[in-house]
Image (cartoon, helix red, strand yellow):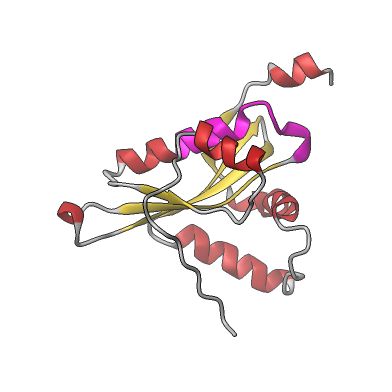
Amino acid sequence: MSGDAMNAVDVSVRKVRADELPQLLQLYRYLNPDDVALPPMEIVAGTWQAMQAHPGMRVLAACAGDELLATATLVIVPNLTRGARPYALIENVVTAPAWRKRGIASRLLHATCEMAWAEDCYKVMLMTGRKDEPTLRFYRNAGFVDGDKTGFIARPA
């Protein structure tokens, strides 16, 4: 496919279907290439089923037909502050390398935030471990700002 044809592709954003787990896992390989190996597929499939059944969780994808080009996970969390308005978290944002720098992930993030706003979320949070300026600029251009809060992460010992 030529560069012009790839740029003109019709992209939609939707929830990842249950049968698209293999494609989703392929995208995740691009997210963390050095990640630990997954457990056996029956465990992975059980986790995928639990994710799909989890209230407020949506695994979304930017798609061209049945091909997943990019993905992000949106979690909407009920809340008893801010007028009992929920907040949202975005995690696991990744685009297949062949589809990067075409605005696809930006469209995905925009649609993801629109879903959160439609649920009356008062904020959407996104963290990245990446420090390179192009990635940070991408998130800024997608409407995220360097916050006035400090993020902390705890990991098991």
Q: Which image quarter is the C terminus in?
A: bottom right
Give the residue at x 20% y 62%: 80
* Number of dots carrying numbers: 0
**63 lies above or below 56:** above
Q: Residue 125: percent from the left, percent from the top?
A: 42, 51
Q: Is residue 13 visible?
A: no
Q: Is residue 147 visible?
A: yes
Q: Residue 9 appears in which quarter of the rendering?
A: top right
Give me the residue at 63% from left, 34% from top. 63
Q: Nearer the viewer, residue 141 or 87?
A: 141
Q: Is residue 155 above or below residue 99?
A: below
Q: Would residue 33 appear left or right of 146 to someone viewing this image?
A: right
Whole-percent x and y of residue 124? 38, 47
Residue 64 % position (x, y) = 66, 29
* 140 to the left or right of 9: left
Q: Residue at 51% of width from left, 54% of height from top?
A: 127
Q: Please say whether residue 8 is one of the residues in the magenta stretch.
A: no
In magenta stretch: residue 102: yes
Image spot of residue 71 (x, y percent): 60, 44
Q: Residue furthest right?
A: 1
Residue at image coords 66%, 68% = 44
Residue 76's quadrant in the figure? bottom left
**Foreground pick, 96 / 52:** 96
Q: Quadrant of residue 81?
A: bottom left
Q: As displayed, is residue 48 above or below residue 65?
A: below
Name the quarter where the N terminus is drawn. Answer: top right
Magenta region: 97-112
Q: Main secondary structure of the magenta part?
A: helix
